[in-house]
Structures are given as structure tokens and as C-alpha cells.
Image (tube, grey):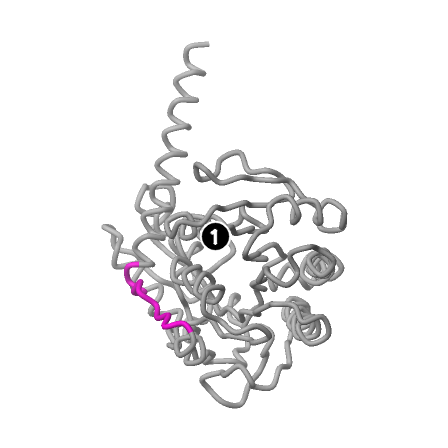
Amino acid sequence: MKALVTGVSGFVGRYLVQNLVDHGYEVWGTSRGVPSSMLEGVHTLKIDFYDKETITNVIEAVKPDVIFHLSGQSSVQYSWSHINETFQSNVMDAIGLFEAVKDSSIKSSVRIISIGSSEEYGLVKDLPIVEDADTNPGNPYGLSKLTLSKLVLSYCSVYQMNIIHARVFNHIGPGQALGFVTSDFANQLIKIELGKAEPVISVGDLSSKRDFTDVRDIVEAYRLLFEKGKAGEIYNVCSGKCVSIQDILTLLVSFSSKPIEVVVNKGKLRPNNVPEYYGSNDKLTETTGWTPSISLENSLRDIYMYWKEQDLYITSDEVQLTLDSQQI
């Protein structure tokens, strides 16, 4: 099997590539800038989605059995100040890909896995959230992903294309950038452990409960959707469980060897209109047999150790730089 992965150098892309290689796939990856390091044996290509000719040439050259379209803008906060960029990346780039596939020689044989978000649902009345729940996104990012899901259904209906749309809830794992709650907490705790910060963490409201799944389980779901999913369908990818931010922090703090004080900063408190938010993965499980295999504790421990290795690496570089300076 041949797989083409867009956004291959991103957080999820790196894990998906590993999963596919482990299962015997020949993997090609695209990125706006070819990554300097990638798994051995993975072919990488630089591509811009506004250039249909280039996309078409790549598709015709590779002739993939599946395209995992991971490329996109993934931050809710960023979307408010960069609405045009968010829609360009999440909607227009996808149209460029869909159009290239529609006009290609492999239209009838290739399957596309489109990546959406739980943000497409917005506020809901009933939990857990199922795929046919009303959609009412509350931010530009969610609206862009909902637009993408509508496009998927249109291309499947009008052009008989083979596309599946995955609505993914919060995913976490080692290597995720700062700006996401588990990485932010772990990074702060490691700095405390290494003596780079005072043993105090200032937090806002920790009572919110959300649905978290390890990225390694997420990419397993993507592969199984290609192998067993049904074209023209939307599938939630989630744990089906609700975990409070307080429980996340408590577990991360338990990994530290130092006593840490958690202080609630009233300046960080925000009105919490959505105290609880989680999805149902019944449709995904019934269709593919997928279930999450990595526990929250193990996922958080791996995240913690990732940031510890990062800080130790940085510290080592700082020491070497100091030594070099002293020799000058």
C-alpha cells in the first residue's frame, strides 16, 4: 500500500508516518518546507496547495492508495487573529487537493482521510457528542473545519469521490508544541525540577473536563479508517471519556521529585460556559474495531519525560556554550 501524508512534518504527521511504516506501507510525505529529518525510507516532497499542477504531478507520480490530509492551521486562538489564513489553510488548500484528485487518473481508486475537529460541534445539549449532533462552531477554526466537512460530503455526493472525515477531539502526546495544556504544564514542572523556576505553578480554572486521547492512538484510528471506514461518512475520534484539567495537573505533578505549590491566579480565571465536553467513539469502534490503548497516565508520563529530555538537552548546550566562551 502507498500512503501520501500532507503536513508530514507536523506533530501528528510524524506519528502517523511511524504507524504506517510499522504496518508495511510505502510512505510519501508533503510539507511546505521539506523537513530536515524524517523516518528512514519516507519520501518527502515540498508542495504548495495553491499550485494545482504541482499537486496533480505529485498524485500522478506517487499514485497513492490513500491520502491522509493532515495539513492545516490547528489553533483556535490563532484563528481569531488570522481568519483569512485559517480558511486558506483549512478550506482552500483542501479544495486544491480535492480538485487535483477529482481530475486525476486515480480518482476512483484513492481514498482521502480528511481531518476535522470537535470544534465543529460547538455548544451541544447532549453528551456524549455523536456524529449527527447539531453543529454550531463558536470560533473561526471550528467554522473552517465544519466547512471542510461539508465540502467532503459534497465531493462524495457530486463526484463520487472516496473521502472520510474524522472529527478529532483533544489529542496529546510527547512532542506536542507549547500552547497546549499538557505540554505547558509539563514544561513548567520540568523547569522547576531542574531548578530553573520557583516551585510554584500559577493556574486558572482547573475544573473543566475534556476528552483527551494519545496521538499514537489517534493515528491508529486514521489508518483503520482508511482500511475499514465507509466513504462519505463522518467519524468521531476520541476516548469517549471526560477528564478534568485538575486531574491532568495532579498526575503530572506526581511525576516530579520536588514539592510543588499550585496557586489559583484570579487574573487567569475565565467564565466557564462549557464545564464538560466529550464525544462518543461508538461509530468508529463498531466500524473499525479501534479502541484507545494508551492510558492517560502513560501518555502524561511520556509527555513529562519528553520535556525533561528537551530541557536537559538545552541545558547541555548552554553548558557547552559557556565552556566555549571561556576558551575564547
The secondary element bearing badge 1 is classed as loop
* In-image side of 5 versus 258 (left or right): right
Q: How many marks?
A: 1
Q: Which residue is mark 1?
A: 1
Residue 82: image location, x then y, percent: 71, 58
At horizontal 46% and vertical 86% (from top left) the residue drawn is 127
Give the crowd class for mark 1: few <14, some 14-19, many >=20 residues within 10 Å.
few
Residue 86: image location, x then y, percent: 69, 60
**Is residue 133 in view?**
yes
Residues rendered magenta in the picture: 288-298
Residue 36: image location, x then y, percent: 53, 34
At horizontal 32% and vertical 52% (from top left) the residue drawn is 302
Magenta residues, dominant SS class:
loop
Q: Residue furthest left?
A: 257
Closer to the camera in the image, 305 or 4: 4
Q: Can residue 292 be found in the magenta stretch?
A: yes
